[in-house]
Image (cartoon, coloured by chain):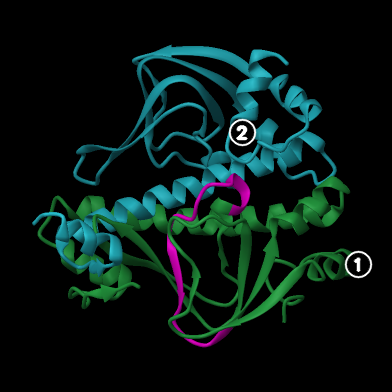
Chain colours: A green, B cyan
Amino acid sequence: MLSRSPLLAELEPETRTDLALKFEIRPFTAGQTLLADGAEGRELMEILSGTADVFVREDHHRYRVATLEPGDLAGEHGFFSGDTRGADVVGSSEGIVAVLTWEAYRSLTQAAHPGAAQLELAVLNSMRDRTLKTNARLGALVDATKTDGFRATFARLFGRVQAAPVVTHD
Amino acid sequence: MTDLTRVLGTLAGLQHESMGALQELAQLFDERRYEGADLCRQGEPADTFWILTSGSVSVVRTTSGNTPVEVAVLEPCALVGIAGLIGIETRAATLRARGPVHVLEMSSAAARARIDNPASLVGGTLRRALIAAVAKQVRHTNINIAKLAVQVGVAERVVDEKNLLSAITVF
């Protein structure tokens, strides 16, 4: 499943095998937090099956800004920058995630393994698509602030029109 | 270690780079100064990018109704104007120097040639800085979306232990 994923599918077979062996495969359940806002951690994740929601916190609220599907990545910012996590990523179904630790990635870069460069290029490709999508969404919302269609624009972009119930965290 | 190398070593994603890689990267840039001017404008080709080393830069997006909105302020040390490095050909916003600003400048095409070359040492350095910068930009964009969601009343209220404790201290 990992070998056929967008992150590895285009690689040379030998490189793909080497890289695949660096990942850990973990199951997750609906409601399970895969990444927590503000937490330390340098793990890069690829959803292999199932879905997960990405929530961004703001002023005692949170908003679901994306739903990750198989092939989507999570945790790139913390992984490459070393910063704390900037969002909650929560399973919205049962699924499987592939996890690359920073130490495993560093072992590739220090050995000048071609898989490290290919992985970075695949991540960049994924980030390009996400940048286009989020920029387009923010642009549409900024435009909508000048009209009376603000809530309708949220509904069109994110599929939720009414305020969701209060969420309690332990 | 030169000042330039030291500055590059503070960029997100480059904290673990070798001195040799940072020195090679430093040699690719031209140093420039802007004051109150636009580094680039929305709608223009994304043919240049910068590393902001001092001063601050406004990110201004003009809406379809021709209203300019400041959507971010960038501070050193940061990779800015990076659309062209990830294959986005046109600027989505204007970058405006707020007072005097010092930058390192490089053409997007020259950087892309290195980024796309898996065997290039400096290409790897650029890729890691770029991923960190793009991810930070997406994060910032999502925060702006969440702020608008709170403003319009469609965000979920979160009650956690920290919030509850802060409520109790009101007594």
Give the crowd class for mark 1: few <14, some 14-19, many >=20 residues within 10 Å: few
In which quadrant is the C terminus of chain B drawn? bottom left
Q: Position of residue A69 (x, y in %)?
A: 52, 76
Q: Please state the total of marks drawn on the protein image.
A: 2
The magenta stretch spans which residues? A79-95
Direction right: furthest residue = A14
Q: Position of residue B96 (x, y in %)?
A: 36, 25
The mark lying in front, picked from 2 and 1, is 1
Q: Which quarter of the figure has residue B108?
A: top right
Q: Is residue A15 left or right of residue B42?
A: right
Q: Chain of mark 2?
A: B
Q: Which quarter of the figure has residue B127?
A: top right
In the picture shown, does residue B22 fall above or below B32? below
Is B56 covered by the magenta stretch? no
Q: Which residue bears the numbered disc 2? A: B108
Front residue (pair B109, B111) = B111
Amino acid under disc 2: Ser
- Residue positioned 24% across, 71% down in the render: A155
Q: Secondary structure at mark 1?
A: helix
Mark 2 and mark 1: span between their CA atoms?
32 Å
Q: Is residue B143 left or right of residue A130?
A: left
Q: Which residue bears the numbered disc 1? A: A14
